Amino acid sequence: MTRLGPMTHTALTCSLLAGSALAAPGAHADDPSWNGRYAITFHTDQKTGTSMAAGQPETPYTASYQFTTDCSSGTCEAKSVDGPAPKDNVAPTVSLQWTGTQWEKARDWRWDCLMPDRTIIYDQAHTVTTYVPQPDGSLTGSIATTIDAGACKGTVIIPVTARPA
């Protein structure tokens, strides 16, 4: 069994905190609700990209989150109200915006770059997380990260799925 690396934990937490969004069954542009408990799976074993981090083997990870949606401001926003504790280098709350076709969150943060000697260097990164509602009530998407500089410079794309728990 491959141990989850620090990079994955950061990516996963960032994903959750930067944009892990889940829609309720049947969510679409006319009714973009995302309410209830969902299991989010980070398919880190399927990650791709140009960063050396994309080639580091990892095991998929699933975490459970409770979400609520508020559209009272005219823009629908989904927030996590319960889930795993985040790492120090990511925001402690999850909030995503409905774009009309998907839940999305973009953010800047620090990527945990796992070096060959097992030390970690933090590199500036930008992540866009998206989730697209599917007819069966699940969502599919990705955590697309661009690491701006440093040893892990490049891209890492991690597929994600969300299912009602």
Image (cartoon, helix red, strand yellow):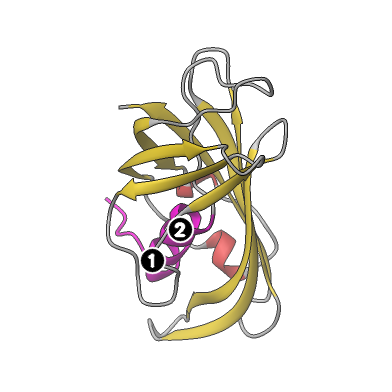
Furthest toward the front, the residue is 72
Please provide percent x and percent y for residue 56: 49, 63
- Determine whether 52 is above or below 55 in the image: below
Mark 1 or mark 2, earlier in chain: 2
Please provide percent x and percent y for residue 86: 34, 65
Under tag 2, what secondary structure? Answer: helix
Toward the viewer: 76 or 99? 76
Toward the viewer: 31 or 63? 31
Residues marked 1 and 2 touching at CB (< 8 Å): yes
The tag on residue 92 is 1
Residue visible at 48% across and 37% down in the picture: 69
Which quadrant does the C terminus fall into?
top left
Q: Residues within 10 Å of mark 1 (few under 14, many from 20)?
A: some
The tag on residue 136 is none
Please provide percent x and percent y for residue 60: 38, 45
* Side of 48 relative to 20 (left or right): right
Residue visible at 49% across and 86% down in the picture: 121
- Displayed quadrant of residue 42: top left
- Displayed quadrant of residue 140: top right
Residue kind at label 1, given as amino acid type: Pro
Q: Residues under labels 1 and 2: Cα distance?
A: 6 Å
- Residue interval drawn in magenta: 1-18
Residue kind at label 2, given as amino acid type: Leu
Please provide percent x and percent y for residue 153: 68, 76
Under tag 1, what secondary structure? Answer: loop
Q: Is residue 15 magenta?
A: yes
Classified by dominant secondary structure, the portion drawn in magenta counts as helix
Q: Is residue 98 magenta?
A: no
- Determine whether 15 is above or below 97 in the image: below
Residue visible at 53% across and 74% down in the picture: 111
* Side of 45 relative to 29 (left or right): left
The tag on residue 17 is 2
